[in-house]
Amino acid sequence: MNLSPDSLNADCACISLDRPALGRALEFEVGDAEFSRRLAETHPTLISSLPVFIRAEHATRMAQIIEAIEAIAKLPAYRQAALESAPAAAQFEPGAIGVLMGYDFHVGPGGPKLIEINTNAGGALINAFVARAQKVCCPAIERVFPGPVERQDIGATFLESFRQDWRRQRGDAPLTAVAIVDTDPQAQYLYPEFVLFERLFRRHGMASIIAPPQALEHRGGRLWCGSQAIDLVYNRLTDFSLDEPAHAALRTAYLSDDVVVTPNPWSHAMFADKRNLVRLTDVETLERWGVVEKLRTLVRNGIPKTVLVVPGRAEELWTMRSRLFFKPAAGFGGRAAYRGDKITRRVWQSILEGGYVAQDLVPPSGRTVIVDGRREVMKLDIRNYTYDGKVQLVAARLYQGQTTNFRTPGGGFAPVVWQRAGDCR
């Protein structure tokens, strides 16, 4: 039996999700016997039934690339450059550095390539439950692939990162109340994860509220949600600079240092603004900043070359567009992002006017799944959830189409496993 990750991704269906076990775990966590049934009805393509296999050295290389980026991001020259183009709210450095960062990779013949960095990366806690609900039907694979988390309590790991971010800004003061904030939370696709985080915080002795930003008030040197004073906001908003009128109370409380917000505008400017990828893939810039050769090599080999889309390069970029992927610098979730070979002249004009970057195209790898008895090949990317440059959990997203959409039968979040060293040929 060929146990290489590429072969297993193409042919193996003998490790699968134990959905009853996952349902029981979720229901126990939230204290609701109907939670998993409702989730299956409303989110049928949120979770894939099969895992994704990768090489151990690729997992190691992704972690090294992430560590290299975060080491470079500590340099004064990098921070100055990131803040020069950042919105006003990002100029305030509060201390909290941002929980649950998401580093997204495509993995191909040349190894892992970083596609983008996200703050408030969704799916972390759901993926922790999914990873622990896998069943192994083949002893040969069980010997080689130990499983994605091996009994580790990932929820506790995530919780500790919130506490660490709190301590970075508040020292030894007690963390007693958390608000999970997003626009119209119950309408968000990942609302079930908000519920899981709410229960996680409550189970560890904190008051926890899921709230829209309009429910918040800034008064008396505190942020309030009704009668509950809020210590920390787990920020799931995609208004990364908190500029929208509905976010005024949160913005003023944050800039007054009256609440800890994580992730926050500063962390988005430092990492998730895609103009940072331009800087990280410019050899002359890194040399000028004094970045050591080891780190330069890691980012040069691990991040596709990225450039700003500016009118002066319009003709050049249009000519080579089939080799490029175009993304808005402050975008997220693949919105308004385009493969170069798919764009029209009308779209191209909007790209020229819209603050875009162009990144060398790195095609995603694939995973074969069974849908209604038929073999379907899904595209996939690999997400590393991190805190302070350290990987906490690795998961995959399976999809069809141009970007991840959680609408493809057989697709969705999937656990990632890699072989023990020396065991896979």
Image: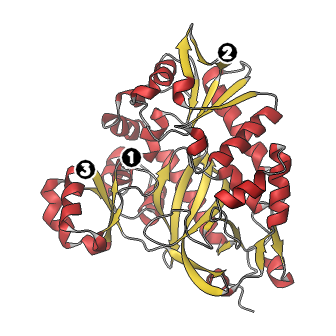
Secondary structure type for disc 3: loop
Task: Specify which label sits upstream in the sequence, 3 or 2.
Answer: 2
User: Callout 3, which amino acid?
Assistant: Gly
Disc 3 designates what residue? 354
Please state which of the two labelled residues, at mark 3 or mark 2, is closer to the viewer.
2
Task: Specify which label sits upstream in the sequence, 3 or 1.
Answer: 1
User: Callout 2, which amino acid?
Assistant: Ser
Quarter of the rendering occupied by the C terminus: bottom right
Q: Return the x and y of residue 274 as percentages of the image width and height.
A: 38, 50
Q: Return the x and y of residue 18 as percentages of the image width and height.
A: 81, 68
Q: CA distance from mark 1 to mark 2?
A: 51 Å
- Can residue 388 be seen here? The reply is no
Q: CA distance from mark 3 to mark 1?
A: 32 Å
Disc 1 designates what residue? 290
Disc 2 designates what residue? 227
Classify 10 Å Cα crowding around label 2: few (below 14), some (14-19), many (20 and above).
Answer: few
